[in-house]
Amino acid sequence: MAAATYLFFTLIIASTLCSFGSVPSIEAQKLTLSVYYETLCPRCATFIVKNLARIFDNELITILNLRLVPWGNASTNNSKNATFCQHGPDECRLNSLEACAIDVLHDVNKHFALIYCIEFLAIEGRHKEWQTCFSSLGLPLKPVLDCYESANATKLELKYANETAYLSQPLKFVPWLLLNNQPIGNDYENFASYVCKAYKGVAVPMACGSVHLKQKAQ
């Protein structure tokens, strides 16, 4: 991964980007963006690295509750006590690992930075090198591994499996994006415009300036 990318997310982790104005009012106005994906799905990895990561640079993260759900088209076989993933056992392992990262590293800046790094490696066919992401980002490996190697990983994945299975509008492909529980569908790469149009708060982020000026003019 380019040094500039590592530096960018390392700086995010250091600052945590959590001090934007009045926290209670901003929190109440935030939109929820849920991203359902698979860790070794090429289209998912590309979306996370090339599209979703921009929200940390253009300030959209300040108006979003970002939820990452690493399950997608995986399935379980209760009789065999097994999980099957579309891209094989490595994807099942990484789904669980990223689920644990989300659970252990509560700060979205931290767990997204880690997931970004892993998905970047997946694009390059180097996903087996995922442990290097912890050291390069200065994130603790042990608590995530403790979760991954325990029953908690299975519980987290079953939670995501149930959530995905019982979506009000079923998942049709991945990545599958919901904005305040409404699917964006095939236009998922253009998710930022949907976020800006839906946002009704006063703290308009840089990325939404032109959209909100048009709305006021209308």
Image: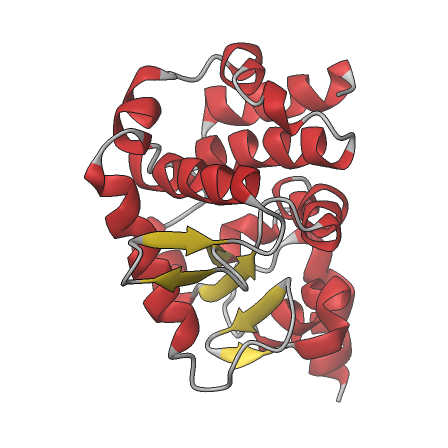
- Relative depth, front residue between 6 and 29: 6
Dividing the picture into quadrants, the one containing residue 183 is bottom right
- Please state the horizontal and vertical placement of residue 189, each as a whole percent of the image: 76, 63
Relative to 210, is 134 above or below?
above
In the displayed orientation, state which residue is furthest to the bottom: 218
Q: Is residue 13 above or below residue 186?
A: above
What's the residue at 50%, 86% (across, down)?
169
Question: At which x and y percent is residue 128?
Answer: 61, 24
Res. 25 visible in picture: no
Pinpoint residue 123: horizontal percent, then vertical percent.
76, 36
User: In the rendering, at what x and y percent does residue 172 appear?
Assistant: 62, 78
Residue found 43% across the figure and 70% down from its top = 164
- Say whether residue 173 is visible: yes
Q: Residue furthest left?
A: 151
Which residue appears at 40% of the width and 58% of the height? 26
The N terminus lies in quadrant: top right
Residue 105 to residue 85: above or below? above
The number of numbered discs placed on residues in the rendered structure image is 0
Q: Does 38 sit left or right of 216 as displayed?
A: left
Q: Residue at x 38, y 36 (%)?
A: 107
Q: Image quadrant for the C terminus?
A: bottom right
Q: Is residue 2 above or below residue 79?
A: above
What colour scheme governs how the chains and residues are painted in the rendered image of this protein? secondary structure
